[in-house]
Every structure is written in C-alpha cells, then in structure tokens.
Amino acid sequence: MTIAGTTSNSLASLLSTTLNNANASNNSGSSSLTGSPISTGPIDVNTLVSQLMTVEAQPMNRLKSQESGVQAKLSAYGQVQSALSSFDTAVAALKLGSAFSAAQATVTGSGVSATVSGTPAAGSYSVTVSALAQAQAAASAPLAGASTVVGTGTLTLQLGTYSSGGNTFNPKSGSNPVNITIDSTNNTLGGIAAAINSASAGVTASVVTDNSGTRLVLFSSSTGTANGFKLTVADGDGSNTDMTGLSQIAFDPTAAAGAGKNLTQTQTATDAQYSINGLSLTSSTNSITTAISGLTLNLIQAPASGSTLQAQITVGTDSAAVTSNVNRFVTAYNSLVSLENSLTSYSSGSNTASVLTGESSMFGLSSQLRSILGSQVSGAAGAPSWLADVGINFQRDGTLSLNTSKFASALAANPTGVAQLFSNATGTGNQQGFAIRLASSVESMLSQTGLIGGTQASLQSTISSMNHRMTQMQTQLTQTQKRLITLYSKLNADLVVAQQNQVALANALAGLPPP
C-alpha cells in the first residue's frame, strides 16, 4: 500500500507538471510568433506555404500572361504606326503640285554653271560672260620677315568705290570707317595682319613671302567695285604718308604713289559683266541669284582679254526627281503592306496565328488604303484618272509596282494632268488627287481617336488597368503569405510541444514500477 500510494502520487505530479509545461509552451509560442516560419518541427513551413502560394498566385499569373499578350499587340501596333508615318511622309511629298514641276538646268558651252534654287520657268537662256567680279588686292614693299617691326599709330580702313575718271573714292553706303590701333604689342608685319583680321573691317590681311622678301597683302573680303578699300594712317612718327614707319602700308587710291598710296595694287575691284539673251547686266558677285527667278548662275571662268565666253542654259522638268518621289511613295506603301502581312498572317500547317491576326483595326487600315488607291480620280478630259494610267499597278500580293518608263512618258505628255492626279486639292471625294485623300486618311488613322492611334490608346489603357489590378493582387498575396506563415508556424510550435509532452509522458510511464 505504501509503495502503490507513493507511485500514484508521483505520476499525478508528473502529469500535472507536464500539462502545465505544455500550457506554458502554448502561451509562450503564441505570443512570440512574428510571421517568420519556424524551421524546426514536423511541418516544413517553407515548402507548404510555397505550394499554397503557387495556387493562390494562379489568378495573378493568368493576368500577367494576358498583359504580356496586350503588350505584344501594343508593340506590333507601334510598328504599324511607324510604317504608316513613313508612308504619310512619302505621300506628303506628292501633295504639292510643285513636286511634279521639279526643274533641272542643263548647260552647254563654257564660262557658266547653273543650279536650280527655286521653281524656274521652263525655257532656254543664252548667257555671255565678258568679265568676272574681282576683289581688290594690294601688297606692301618687301620686308625682312613677319617679325619685322613696321611702326605704331592708327590704321583706318574704309570700304568704297574708286573712280579713276575723277580720281575720287566714294565710301560704301552703310559702311563705316574702322580704326585699328597698332602699338608695341602688334607693330610687326605679322602683328598688323592679325590686328586687321580681328577688326572685321571687310578686308583680309595675310603675310606672303616671295623671292624678294616678306610682304603684307590686303584684299577685300567681297568682290565688286563697291567693296574696294582705302587704308589711311595716323603714324606715330608724325608723318602719315611717307615710306617710313606705319605709313609705309598706307593705301589711298587717290594719292600719289609713295605719298599715301604706298601699297602696290595687284588686283582691281571689278563687277562681273555678262548678258542674258542679249540683255547686258552687271553683278558684284560671280554667284547670281536674281537674274533668272528660281535659278542660280555661277560665272566660273574669265574670258581672254577682249573676248567673251558663251553658254546655253536649258531649264526643263526634272523627270528623274519626280519619278524618285513617286518611287518612294510606292516603296513606303509596299513596306506597310509587307509589315501588315507579317503581323496578321495565319499558318494553317502549324495552326499558329500572328500577333494581330483577326484585328479589325488592321483590316480597316488595309481596306481604306486599297479603296483609295484602286479608285478613279474625276479630272479633266484626257488627263490620267487611274494610277495605272501613269504606270502604278497593284500586284497579286497586294503591293504596288511602278513602270518608270510609262510614268516618264505620262509626265512628259501631260505634266499638269499627272500633278493633278496626285495633288488636286479642290472639290471633294474622288475629285481630289490620290495624295490628298491618302494623307487625310492616314492622318485620321494616326490621330488619338483614329483607327491606329485610338487602338494604341485603348491597349495602353488596358495595360494600365491590368498593372493596377496586379498591384492590388500582389498586396493581397503578400498578406496571405504572412497569414499562412503565422498559422503554420504556430501549428508547428504546438506539435513540437505535443511531441515533447508525449516523450515526457512515455518516459514517466516507463519509469513506473510494474504493478
């Protein structure tokens, strides 16, 4: 009895202690959980929560996949927009009637070249060159070198015209005298040249060395009689016109040689003399832009003394330039068609659709453009009214081809009619030219509410909405993951305590004396 009673009391005490410890462990574990998984215990919390979250994330993954598809469509429409913009640029070049009157100038003979600078009228011009425009030039007497000191004082440069008949120098209208100070810092031949060049007085200076020595050479920056120059000196030695000091480089064309006219004139300022179709003309420059509207004449060769040079300039339509513009239009359209085909094609063999297969916007784009290109322009009688009339035809694959020979013939036969076929902006509907109607259609498609621009805006809005939903779903998934970690970590802790209690109880029972 004594032993049995003692054993029963000991077991009761052990069970009580174990239960108290279990309750204490439960309370302690519940209050210490922070959401991080408990790695020890019978449950692999990380793996379990990861598997559960894979299931929880399925709706978000489906939404991501959908968003990826929408992004692919938006990217494809971006390519369409780019190709359509290139086509619009090519079409814009044909909207102006001047695109079909591009001129070229052909020159035969010598002395003259010509370039088109505007829209000259077609015609033939006979040009005779009697003299080229020249800039005045003068040189000093030779000195030892560029570092030779000349003198100090003030140089005064004035542009103007010298008249040998009255021995007068008339200042150029709007041109003021420019004073240049020469002191000990720039009184050498090289220093004086640099000072003159820095003054921007319309005269350029250089130092030239020949067999006789080193000279200061001055020449007008511009050609023509009105751009001659006079150089007067206020010499630091008090004598302004002699051949010593700074005055040795004075050049007053009205003065006597060696007494103010101390430079040697090597080239006279002259105007160009020429005639166009017998009309005598002069020019201060050899590049003449005002004689023939839209044409720049360049007098490039001086005739021998007492003779002239003759050239014939013919201005006509530059069919190659016009054809090039039309060819760019055809190429841009074909690039658009090729892109459209690649983005909307369907492979029956592999049962695979392209990114924009079945898109109504793409169908609308192609049908609108083909409808315009395949229509007839109601123009003047005898003028071309179909693209085929000027050598532009549809091919079996939906692209266009250009017969350049047929186009050139149509342009030569009726340049106005060809221009109207593309650029006529009067009237409505089929009365307008192809380029006018195509430009209007394309620009409408590209607008924010248009066929392509509107579709892009809608897709972008869908992507923004999807991104917002995914942000919300991610927040919910984060909360769910934390909740599952907390839940299964607590369960893991409870099971650890239960296992410990079970072991303790088993050990206690094993320690009891047999009955």
Image (cartoon, grey):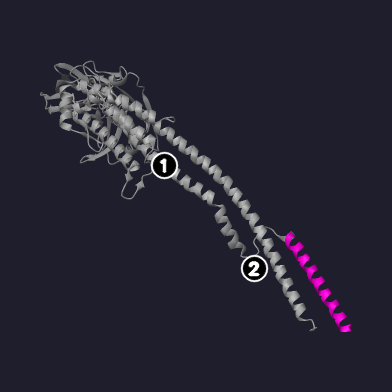
Q: From this view, report whether residue 497 is shown above or below residue 366.
A: below
Which percent across, then down, holds residue 472? Answer: 58, 45
Disc number placed over residue 73 in the picture, else none = 1
Which percent across, then down, holds residue 197? Answer: 34, 33
Residue 294 showing in the rendered view = no
Decide whether residue 10 is among the magenta residues. yes
Which percent across, then down, holds residue 448? Answer: 44, 31
Per the rendered image, the range of residues in magenta is 1-30
Q: From this view, report whether residue 41 is shown above or below residue 458.
A: below
Please tell me whether mark 1 sits on a helix, a strand or a loop: helix
Instruction: Report the magenta stretch's main SS.
Output: helix
Amino acid carrying mark 2 in the image: Pro
Amino acid carrying mark 1 in the image: Lys
Could you tell me which quadrant the N terminus lies in?
Answer: bottom right
Q: Is residue 468 left or right of residue 204?
A: right
Disc number placed over residue 447 in the picture, else none = none
Q: From this view, report whether residue 349 is shown above or below residue 150.
A: below
Residue at left offset 77%, top offset 78%: 508
Please name which of the two marks, 1 or 2, marks the residue nearer to the observer.
2
Residue at left offset 29%, top offset 40%: 338
Q: Is residue 284 left or right of residue 509?
A: left
Q: Is residue 346 left or right of residue 256?
A: right
- Distance from label 1 to label 2 (Cα)? 49 Å
Please tell me whether mark 2 sits on a helix, a strand or a loop: loop
- Check if mark 1's residue and mark 2's residue have beta carbons within 8 Å: no
Q: Which residue is mark 2?
A: 42
Residue 145 showing in the rendered view = yes
Which percent across, then down, holds residue 185? Answer: 40, 38
Could you tell me which quadrant the C terminus lies in?
Answer: bottom right
When asked about the image quadrant of residue 168, the answer is top left
Q: Local crowd at mark 1 within 10 Å, few (<14), some, or many (≥20)?
A: many
